[in-house]
Amino acid sequence: MSLTPTLAQAWIDRWDRQQEGYLPDREIMFAVIADAVAAKADRPDPLVLDVACGPGSLGARIRERLPLARVIGVDADPVLLELARTAYGFELVDRNLADPAWIAELPTEPIDAIVSTTALHWLYPDQLAALYAQSAKLLRPGGILLNGDDMATRATDIDQLHQAIGTGQLEREGVGDRENWEQWWTAITAEPELATAVAERDDRRWEHPSDSGATYEQHLKLLHEAGFRTAESIWQYGRRRIIAAVN
Ligand SMILES: C[S@@+](CC[C@H](N)C(=O)[O-])C[C@H]1O[C@@H](n2cnc3c(N)ncnc32)[C@H](O)[C@@H]1O
């Protein structure tokens, strides 16, 4: 027996509902990122790299918006990669972004867009700096990096407001009873069709922060130091932002 596309999609749909329990506007973030990729693409088939792609939800939304886009996902989680591979047929790179050698697996042609959602807070600041520097080299001139994630501002009084806005949003959206991260992982760990990937995941767990705490201002600084011409928030709800950086 092996994982079917239908079963993989069911697990991804369940992942998406779980993630929306933390990010009620996750689909809006995907739509904003897809619009920005489309706006900066100078061809109908842009090459798009989704870093820390998980099971491929963002890449799938970009392909809905730009059906000819070539999406390559990078992640180090064998279970999530197996779901993306089976459901979406993406090109996938199984590499840890903390190891700078991950870029050796990529095509040599310039990349039009590098995207990411709710993942780069798993990187330590030096790893984030290295990723941004590598991204500036990988992107074509005029290419765009889009990072959607929670980012505190260094202005603590404003950050308190952002947190309050986020709490209010969760209450209003009524997502408090969604399956949570731990419950989703407990459930998928028992999926027989993923037993090999689950065992591999147990073997290769890596040490990372649950939240590096990199502030919005630190992200902008690192992006400018990496060589991006401009970097600015293009969407925000409380702490949650999408930063666009143009090469
Ligand atoms: C909360 S999930 C988000 C997944 C996906 N971007 C989404 O929006 O559904 C965080 C993802 O980042 C990946 N990730 C975190 N650190 C990583 C690293 N150093 N190398 C590769 N992937 C990493 C995890 O494996 C996981 O898939």
Image (cartoon, grey):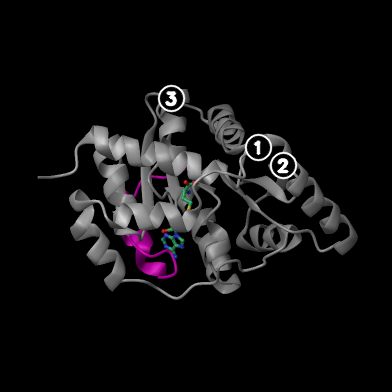
Identity of the residue drawn at 34% across and 62% down:
95
Binning the other alpha carbons within 10 Å of mark 1 as few (below 14), some (14 to 19) or many (20 upward) gives few
Q: Nearer the viewer, residue 20 or 178?
A: 178
Q: List the residue tagged with mark 3.
A: 64
Picture quadrant where residue 7 is located: top left
- Mark 3 / mark 2, whichever is N-terminal: 3
Q: Secondary structure at mark 2?
A: helix
Q: Judge from the rendering whether residue 166 lies leftward or rightward of residue 65; answer left or right.
A: right
**Can residue 131 be seen in the rendering of this structure?**
yes
Q: Which residues are magenta?
A: 95-112
Gap in angstroms between the C-alphas marked 1 and 3? 27 Å
Gap in angstroms between the C-alphas marked 1 and 2? 5 Å
Q: Secondary structure at mark 1?
A: loop
Gap in angstroms between the C-alphas marked 3 and 2? 30 Å
Whether tag 3 and tag 2 are in contact, CB under 8 A, the answer is no
Amino acid type at image mark 3: Glu
Nearer to us: label 1 or label 3: 1
> Residue 184's spot in the image, x, y percent?
41, 51
Query: Quadrant location of the N terminus?
Result: top left
Query: Does the magenta run of residues contain 136?
Result: no
Q: List the residue tagged with mark 1.
A: 174
**Furthest residue in direction left, as rendered:** 1
- Image mark for residue 8: none
> Residue 10's spot in the image, x, y percent?
33, 36
Question: Is 189 drawn above or below residue 205 in the view shown?
Answer: above
Amino acid type at image mark 1: Gly
Q: List the residue tagged with mark 2.
A: 171
Q: Judge from the rendering whether residue 235 lies leftward or rightward of residue 196; answer left or right.
A: right
Binning the other alpha carbons within 10 Å of mark 2 as few (below 14), some (14 to 19) or many (20 upward) gives few
Q: Nearer the viewer, residue 34 or 158?
A: 158
Picture quadrant where residue 56 is located: top left
